[in-house]
Image (cartoon, helix red, strand yellow):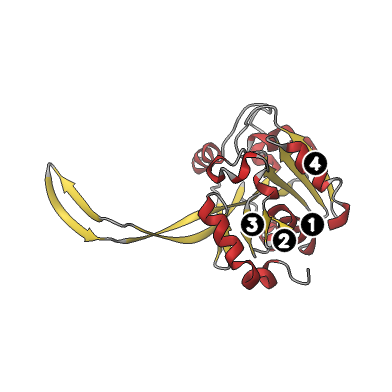
Amino acid sequence: MHAIILAGGKGTRLRPYTTRLPKPLMPIGDEFSILDIVLNQLAQHGFDRATLAIGYLGDLIRSYVGDGGRWGLDIDYATEEAPLGTIGPVLRILDRLPEHFLVMNGDVLTDLNYRELLERHERMRPPITVATYQREVKVDFGVLATRDGRVIDFTEKPTLNYRVSMGVYAISKSALAPYPPGLPLGFDELMTDMLGQPVPPEEYAFGGYWLDIGRPDDYDRANAEFDRVRPRLLKGA
């Protein structure tokens, strides 16, 4: 089983932390980086190969990870000279990938079973399976609905519920074959295209632990929670 880990972004929302360290190498707890945790989990779930798509401060990631031997993984690299979006780096290495593979952001903390996601995708055979999570967003304002200048509804500080992408996907190579390598391609563009296809994307609904470390508040929360969630994230490590 093969995973592509997207680790090339500049992590601008996490500055100033990421001015000298790429986001996947940010420390969580006293022993691990984010990338450490992800690679441990992939190995625990039976993955044997991973490709790291690197760009910003990529030499630091390459130095830290090496060939992946300490995690029991065979790791290679795809270097972005310019930003290519979420899916663009995958297109450049498509000929090196099996028919079904995992793509994930390098800044996600979750106890999602990556193997189950990929195996479900292989059974169902959609073009892409998106891991999703129920997210509540509390609005700190009174929300108005208006029509023709008149207020027709009002809700005080509502809580909105959304199913959001977790930044983890199982993808079939054949679904990406029509796209030319070397050009930027975002997940949003791919999803828009896929929604118009005869076979639409599938959802893998998840209800466990998930945290996208995109902002300083998220990073602080990850460290505050790590001792509690470590047994779920790193079984036996």
Task: Judge depth for marks 1 and 3 and give the one in front.
Answer: 1
The one nearer the camera, 41 or 61, is: 61
Q: Earlier in the sequence, mark 2 or mark 1?
A: 1
Residue 197 location (% of width, % of height)? 53, 41
Where residue 45 sits, quadrant-wise, is bottom right
**Which numbered disc, 1 or 3, marks the residue that appears first in the sequence?**
1
Badge 1 marks a residue whose secondary structure is loop
Gap in angstroms between the C-alphas marked 4 and 2: 25 Å
Quadrant in the picture for the C terminus: bottom right
Mark 4 or 1, closer to the camera: 4
Check disc 3 and report its element: helix, strand or loop. helix
Q: Which mark is residue 124?
A: 3
Q: Amino acid at mark 4?
A: Arg
Structural distance between the alpha carbons of marks 2 and 3:
14 Å
| SS of the residue under disc 2 | helix
Q: Do callouts 4 and 2 mark residues in contact (Cβ within 8 Å)?
A: no
Q: Residues within 10 Å of mark 4 (few under 14, many from 20)?
A: some
Q: Which residue is under mark 4?
A: 62
Q: Which mark is residue 47?
A: 1
Name the residue beneath numbered marker 2.
Answer: 115
Q: Amino acid at mark 3?
A: Met
Marks 2/1: CA distance? 8 Å
Q: Are marks 2 and 1 in contact (CB under 8 Å)?
A: yes
Q: Which comes before the other along the chain, label 2 or label 3?
A: 2
Badge 1: few (under 14), some or many (20 or more) residues near its Cα, within 10 Å? Answer: many
Q: Is residue 139 left or right of residue 121?
A: left
Report if the CB atoms under discs 1 and 3 are less than 8 Å apart: no
Q: Do the residues bearing badges 3 and 4 touch, measured as CB atoms within 8 Å?
A: no
State the image coordinates of residue 191 (x, y, percent, origin top left): 53, 42
